[in-house]
Amino acid sequence: MRADHETRLAWLGPSFPIYLDVLPVRSAEIPVQYTSLKLGYSSTNPGLNIEERKKAGAAIEDVLRGEPEAAPAPVD
């Protein structure tokens, strides 16, 4: 979390000081946001196995195949 404000920062306009003293350097607790969305660490869905991931990826490739701005899928 702290790295988002220290090393992975980007400014759109004049800089504004952010006081990092209140942020932990390391934390055993995973910070979550928007738990009501049930996404990411807040997800209640079980993880997908590799075959399910490949099937979902193939479906996405099929949808995007005709899109001129879509990047090509990586090759194994």
Image: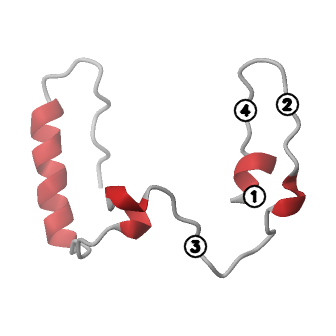
Residue 66: horizontal and vertical position, in percent?
13, 23
Q: CA distance from mark 1 to mark 3?
A: 12 Å
Circle number at residue 69: none
Q: Nearer the viewer, mark 2 or mark 4?
A: 2
Q: CA distance from mark 2 to mark 4?
A: 11 Å
Q: Is residue 6 left or right of residue 65?
A: right
Query: Which residue, given by chain and number where applicable, does mark 1 sit on?
Result: 2
**SS at badge 2:** loop
Q: Residue furthest front?
A: 36
- Please state which amino acid type lies under the numbered disc 1: Arg
**SS at badge 3:** loop
Position of 50 relative to 63 (above/below)? below
Q: Residue at x 32, y 45 (%)?
A: 74
Q: Which mark sits nearer the N-terminus, 3 or 4?
A: 4
Q: CA distance from mark 3 to mark 4?
A: 23 Å
Q: Is residue 24 left or right of residue 40?
A: right
Q: Residue at x 29, y 20 (%)?
A: 69
Q: Nearer the viewer, mark 3 or mark 4?
A: 3
Query: Which residue, given by chain and number where applicable, does mark 4 sit on?
Result: 10
Quarter of the picture containing the C terminus is bottom left
Q: Are marks 2 and 3 in contact (CB under 8 Å)?
A: no
Q: Residue 59: in sight, yes or no? A: yes
Query: Which residue, given by chain and number where applicable, does mark 3 sit on?
Result: 30
Q: Are marks 2 and 1 in contact (CB under 8 Å)?
A: no
Query: Which residue, given by chain and number where applicable, does mark 2 sit on?
Result: 16
Q: Is residue 41 left or right of residue 24?
A: left
Q: Nearer the viewer, mark 2 or mark 1?
A: 2
- Please state which amino acid type lies under the numbered disc 3: Ile
Residue 40: horizontal and vertical position, in percent?
39, 62
Q: Residue at x 90, y 59 (%)?
A: 21
Instruction: Tell me where residue 20 sits by quadrant.
Output: bottom right
